[in-house]
């Protein structure tokens, strides 16, 4: 039976599975090429887990600006609407396959909000 997201370990498992899906997606995997090629994927995943742990479990581990690296990447490798749609699809599918509950619903709402804000900022840059 599925349970709601309760711990960092839950978030860690979800994020690892989510990134496995992103890295298999021919439409998205090129965004991660430099991170993977330079052996920085594991560090990146820790940062992403920190980000979602702050959102879902109200911790204060994430110390970065989430927009900054995405805007820099966008300059050389533009994010298109279809990329955001695919990212959201993988996010929602992965989280729904593992968990169920209020934090899951909140995570999906926040993911949509984040994607929407990023898309708007990237279109205006």
Image (tube, grey):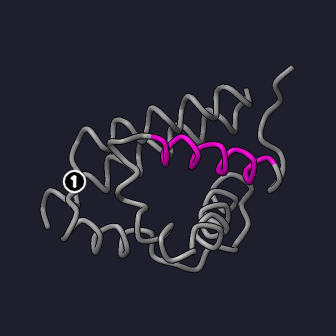
Q: Position of residue 2 (x, y in %)?
A: 81, 24
| Residue 68 screen position, x and y as percent | 36, 75
* Residue lying farthest to the top in this orientation: 1
- Which of 17/9 is in front? 17
Q: Which residue is located at x 35 percent, y 56 percent?
A: 30
Q: Residue furthest right?
A: 1
In the image, 80 versus 54, the foreground residue is 80
Quadrant position of the C terminus in the picture:
bottom left
Q: Residue at x 37, y 47 (%)?
A: 28
Q: Which residue is mark 1?
A: 120
Q: Is residue 27 left or right of residue 15?
A: left
Instruction: Give the magenta-colored segment's residue range.
Output: 10-24
> Relative to residue 11, is residue 38 drawn left or right?
left
Q: Residue furthest left?
A: 124
The percent position of residue 13, horizontal first and vertical second, equals 75, 47
* Quarter of the figure that contains the N terminus: top right
- Nearer-the-camera pick, 11 or 40: 40
Q: Nearer the viewer, residue 33 or 89?
A: 33
Which SS type dominates the magenta stretch?
A: helix
Q: Quadrant of residue 67?
A: bottom left
Residue at figure coordinates x 50%, y 77% from the top left: 38
Q: Is residue 64 above or below residue 124?
A: below
SS at badge 1:
helix
Q: Is residue 123 left or right of residue 35?
A: left
Is residue 34 highlighted in magenta? no
Q: Does residue 2 lie above or below 113 as drawn? A: above
């Amino acid at each position: 039976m599925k349970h709601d997201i309760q711990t960092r370990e839950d978030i860690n498992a979800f994020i690892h599975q989510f990134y496995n899906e992103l890295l298999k997606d021919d439409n998205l995997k090129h965004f991660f090429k430099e991170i993977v090629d330079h052996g920085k994927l594991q560090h990146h995943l820790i940062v992403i887990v920190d980000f979602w742990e702050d959102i879902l479990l109200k911790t204060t581990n994430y110390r970065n600006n989430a927009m900054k690296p995405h805007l820099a990447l966008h300059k050389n490798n533009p994010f298109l609407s279809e990329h955001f749609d695919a990212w959201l699809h993988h996010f929602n599918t992965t989280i729904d396959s593992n968990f169920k509950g209020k934090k899951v619903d909140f995570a999906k709402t926040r993911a949509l909000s984040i994607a929407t804000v990023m898309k708007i900022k990237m279109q205006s840059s």
